[in-house]
C-alpha cells in the first residue's frame, strides 16, 4: 500500500492535484472539484491534529473492527458517507483550495510520522502514524480518481 510519508508517493499525489482543473467533473458524489479539495484539506487537518472531531456513536461501536478499510489495499467505495464535519457544501475557490491542500500535503510529508496526530480518527479511532500515512494516501487517491486524475 502506498504511503503519503513516502516522497515518491507524495509527489505522485501532488502531480495529480496539479492535473485537476476548475472544469474537472466528478464521476460520482455531490462535491465539485473545489469542494473536494477543501474536504481533503480538512481531512489533512484531522491527521495533523489541527482539527479534532468527536467520534460518532457508530464509530465508537464498530470503528476498530472496520479500521483496515482506511489503510488496506482495497479502493474505497464510491459514495461512502462522509464525516459530517468534513462535508463541504458551500462554494470554494478552486485555486485557493488546490494550493492550500498541496501545502498541507507537503507539510505533512515533510514533518514525517513523528508529527502525526495522536488524536483518534473521528470514525476509526486510534491509528498509528503508518496507518495515517496509508489512509491519507488512500483518501486522496479516492478523491483524485473521483475527478479523473
Image (cartoon, rainbow, N blue to C red):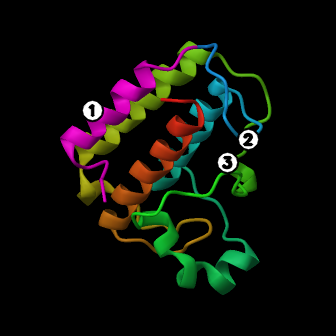
Q: Position of residue 149 (x, y in %)?
A: 48, 29
Which tag, 3 or 2, sits closer to the chain's start?
Answer: 2
Q: Which quarter of the picture shows residue 30?
A: top right
Q: Nearer the viewer, residue 19 or 43?
A: 19
Q: Residue at point 64% right, 60% down?
A: 53
Chain part drawn in magenta? 1-21
Q: Residues within 10 Å of mark 1 (few under 14, many from 20)?
A: some
Residue lying furthest left in this view?
Answer: 7
Q: Earlier in the sequence, mark 1 or mark 3?
A: 1
Which dot marks residue 11?
Answer: 1
Q: Is residue 94 above or below residue 43?
A: above
Using the numbered discs, state the Cα–Cα distance from disc 2 to disc 1 in whole angstroms: 26 Å
Give percent across and percent down for residue 128. 35, 71
* Tag 2–tag 1 contact (CB < 8 Å): no
Q: Residues within 10 Å of mark 2 (few under 14, many from 20)?
A: some
> Which numbered disc covers residue 111?
none
Could you tell me how many numbered marks the image carries?
Answer: 3
Secondary-structure class at tag 3: helix
The image quarter in which residue 121 lies: bottom right
Local SS, label 1: helix
Q: Which mark is residue 86?
A: 3
Kindly report the distance in space between the C-alpha atoms of the residues bearing marks 3 and 2. Answer: 14 Å
Amino acid at each position: 500500500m502506498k504511503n503519503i510519508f513516502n516522497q515518491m508517493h507524495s509527489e505522485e499525489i501532488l502531480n495529480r492535484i496539479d492535473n485537476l482543473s476548475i472544469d474537472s467533473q466528478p464521476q460520482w458524489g455531490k462535491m465539485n472539484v473545489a469542494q473536494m479539495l477543501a474536504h481533503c484539506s480538512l481531512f489533512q487537518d484531522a491527521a495533523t491534529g489541527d482539527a479534532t472531531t468527536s467520534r460518532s456513536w457508530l464509530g465508537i461501536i464498530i470503528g476498530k473492527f472496520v479500521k483496515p478499510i482506511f489503510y488496506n489495499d482495497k479502493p474505497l467505495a464510491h459514495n461512502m458517507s462522509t464525516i459530517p464535519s468534513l462535508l463541504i457544501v458551500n462554494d470554494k475557490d478552486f485555486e485557493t483550495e488546490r494550493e492550500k491542500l498541496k501545502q498541507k500535503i507537503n507539510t505533512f510529508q515533510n514533518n514525517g510520522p513523528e508529527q502525526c496526530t495522536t488524536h483518534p480518527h473521528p470514525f476509526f479511532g486510534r491509528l498509528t502514524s503508518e496507518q495515517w500515512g496509508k489512509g491519507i494516501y488512500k483518501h486522496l487517491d479516492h478523491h483524485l480518481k473521483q475527478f479523473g486524475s
